[in-house]
Image (cartoon, rainbow, N blue to C red):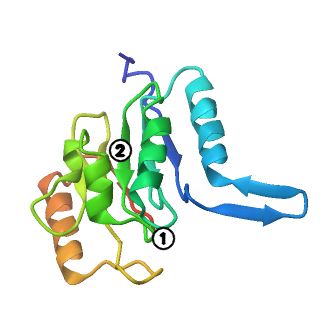
Amino acid sequence: MNNYDKYFTIGQITDLHVGRKIPFPSGEVDLFDQLVKAVDHLNSIDPPLDMAVVSGDLANHGKEEDYIRVKSQLDRLKFPYFIVMGNHDQRETLVKVFSDHPYLVTDDEFIQYTIEDKPIRIITLDTLEPGSHRGLLCEARVKWLKKKLSEQKKRPTLIFMHHP
């Protein structure tokens, strides 16, 4: 366990888009292979990270087989990781594949949660609007965020979401 009085480090990876291959003049790039390299790199950081946030678009089309491939790599991380929804993600399938991540199961239709047991409070927001590439913070999500922020007004807080 790290000494939080000295440092607390968070790695962030985003837009994995596993299931997509991008053509280049020099050859095709499989984004799954890029995820493998990213996990290797994050695991090589010294001193080790305390946690990682995977901020959306884990799979390019929300397919179960792609989430299974993503999970196979993220589970190699040497520290805990937390998932944030992206516009290419599919809530039900993601929750099914990552069923060992209980924070993904929420009481409402959105997958957003707080992490309270770290030196800094972390809030994640679900900006997914199915059928759209644009993110959305509807009235219900903004209300939830305001409630969470008001619970600990003086505590330093980071907010993670997929869309800017």
Q: Residue furthest left?
A: 107
Q: Is residue 92 visible?
A: yes
Q: How many marks?
A: 2
Q: Residues within 10 Å of mark 2 (few under 14, many from 20)?
A: some
Which residue occupies 61% across, 30% down? 40
Q: Which of the 4 image quarters holds residue 15?
A: bottom right
Question: What amino acid is found at the position of numbered circle 1 in the picture?
Answer: Pro
The answer to which of 21 and 41 lies nearer the viewer is 21
Horizontal side of residue 50 vs 99, given as left or right: right
Q: Position of residue 110 (x, y in %)?
A: 22, 67
**Secondary structure category for the residue under label 2:** strand
Classify 71 as above or below 48. below
Q: Quadrant of the N terminus?
A: top left
Classify 42 as above or below 1. below
Horizontal side of residue 86 vs 35, given as left or right: left
Question: What amino acid is found at the position of numbered circle 2 in the picture?
Answer: Phe
Q: Give the CA distance from mark 2 to mark 1.
A: 18 Å
The answer to which of 103 and 31 lies nearer the viewer is 31
Q: Position of residue 17 (x, y in %)?
A: 55, 59
Q: Earlier in the sequence, mark 2 or mark 1?
A: 2
Q: Give the labeled residue for mark 2.
A: 82
Which residue occupies 17% across, 51% down? 152
Q: Which of the 4 image quarters holds residue 88?
A: bottom left
Which residue occupies 90% across, 57% down? 26
Q: Give the labeled residue for mark 1.
A: 164
